[in-house]
Image (cartoon, helix red, strand yellow):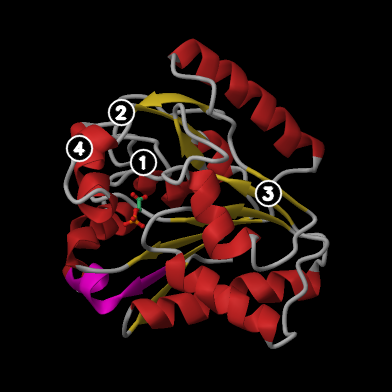
Amino acid sequence: MRNQIIVCENHQEIGDVVATIFAESTTTKPNCVWGLATGASPIPVYKKLCDFYEAEDLDCSQVTTFNLDEYAGRGPGDPDSYYEFMHQHLFDKIPFKKNYLPDAKHSTELDELNESGIRYDAIIDKVGGIDIMLVGIGTNGHIAFNEPSDIISKGTQGVILTEQTRHDNALKFYDGNIDAVPKYALSMGMMSILQSNKIVLIANGPAKALAIRNALYGPITPKCPASLLQLHPNVTFVVDEAAYSLCK
Ligand code: PGA
């Protein structure tokens, strides 16, 4: 299958389109394995999935999910964790078979994060890998917390966040307070992400325009992790006009 680009009018429409893709995956394979993302981009996707569930148009009782990443030292009970984000927006509203997130709560050193990442990858392998993976994109082209680098990351591992990413996330979630954003995280690697059967990338707003152009049409390089998706045979980019504006 050729990679697909769907240009939507706005963020809400991105949510509708992507939620429909994920809902359809459960029709063709009820015990589907989803990879899920956090951040501002996927919120309308999760809202629409909840609408489908409430309308009895979605059954996730056999679906297993794996999240892309978690901040070091955060987890269940911490309102700023990705664990709580996912419960607030999706997992407390729709019953799933099982929801996994990288376990970084008791890991603040890279070695400990790496060991936790190995355990996470073993669980993904055990269920047979990820059928459909939802990813956002950072303004610097990162995917999950795979930051621009000279090397391609492999499995789930401890990462050091860039100042750019900490700055972006501070603006979005912490009133610009960069000290509220941890310096480390646990993130699925690019190789793991590329092993998913299908990948759906979402992006909205003008701040993502350069990253989207580089991801779709730039050189394939870990300096722009999203460009590595060009190597995958089944990726759908679902973007709004503003995020697509530099591709015309
Ligand atoms: P966002 O983050 O959805 O909050 O814009 C995306 C990302 O940084 O991967």
Q: Secondary structure at mark 3?
A: loop
Q: Which residue of the protein is positioned furthest toward the bottom in this rendering? A: 55
Q: Which residues are magenta?
A: 238-245
The residue at the point 53 percent across, 60 percent down is 88
Kindly indicate whether the residue at mark 4 contacts the one at mark 2 (C-beta within 8 angstroms): no
Q: Residues within 10 Å of mark 4 (few under 14, many from 20)?
A: some
Q: CA distance from mark 3 to mark 1?
A: 19 Å
Q: CA distance from mark 2 to mark 3?
A: 24 Å
Q: CA distance from mark 3 to mark 4?
A: 33 Å
Quadrant (top left/top right/bottom left/bottom right) for the N terminus: bottom right
Labelled disc at residue 130: 3
Lower position in the chain sequence, tag 4 or tag 1 = 4
**Amino acid type assigned to the residue bearing label 1 in the image:** Pro
Labelled disc at residue 225: 1
Q: CA distance from mark 1 to mark 2?
A: 8 Å
**Amino acid type assigned to the residue bearing label 2 in the image:** Ser
Q: Main secondary structure of the magenta part?
A: helix
